[in-house]
Image (tube, rainbow, N blue to C red):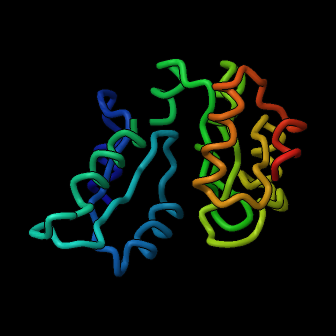
Amino acid sequence: MEAVAAEIARDDVTGVVVTHGTDTMEETAFLLDLVHDSDKPVVLTGAQRAADQPDSDGPRNLREAVAVAALARAAVRAGARAVVLAGTGVGNADHALLEWVAEAVSAGTVVGLSTRVAEGPVVPTYGNGGGVDLVRAGALSIGGLPLYQARLLPALLLSEGFPVTRQALAAHV
């Protein structure tokens, strides 16, 4: 925890990526959530397959974690027209992501709100950085679509020249 705090305090650091074993990653993520008080992201990543396997996921996961730690604001600055946020539970996040959602929406980027859980819809229920606040900040609920389909819907709408609105999404979720 001290190493993360020291790195995140540096002016030249945009975010921190922590490589971690998958067995206890959830506990570390929870502890970091309790003590992390910076707007800069801290991203944990691991791998399910050994490094010596031909289809090892570690290098890809690390590359994607670095993009996420830098991915949110950089995506908006690079001109992303839409981003889908994989919330926890019924579509929740934290204050840092809430701030980013407000910034992204203000910049004209559509933010879809999905969930990382296997089944069940996004239901904006909780405040304090949760789904209620995310929707209030401009995120659009993607309903019960699984995350991967939730990413495709805004992409298809945009590619066909349709605006991504609550009404446009509602017709498909």
22 above or below 9?
A: below
In the rendered image, the vertical position of residue 78 relative to residue 128, given as above or below:
above
At a point 28% along the width and 67% down the height, the residue shown is 47
The total number of labels drawn is 0
Q: Name the residue rendered at 28%, 45% in the picture.
A: 63
The reply, left or right, for residue 5 in relation to residue 31 is left
| Residue 141, horizontal then vertical, whole percent | 79, 48
On the image, the x and y values in percent for residue 159 come to 64, 25
In this view, the residue farthest toward the front is 160
Residue 26, picture quadrant: bottom left
Residue drawn at the location 52% of the way across and 61% of the way down: 33
Rendered view: 97 above or below 23: above
- Residue 134, position as x, y percentages in the image: 75, 45
* Coordinates of residue 130 in the picture (x, y in percent): 74, 55
Question: Where's the N terminus, which quadrant?
Answer: bottom left
Outermost residue, bottom direction? 23
123 or 8, nearer to the observer: 123
Towards the viewer: 111 or 10: 111
Q: Is residue 47 left or right of residue 114?
A: left
Image vertical order of residue 150 relative to residue 29, above or below: above
Foreground residue, 120 or 96? Answer: 120
- Give whichever of 56, 7 is nearer the camera: 56
**Residue at the (68%, 37%) spot, across then down:** 154
Q: Is residue 81 left or right of residue 11?
A: right
| Residue 57 as seen in the image, left or right of residue 98 | left
Quadrant of the rendered image containing residue 131: bottom right
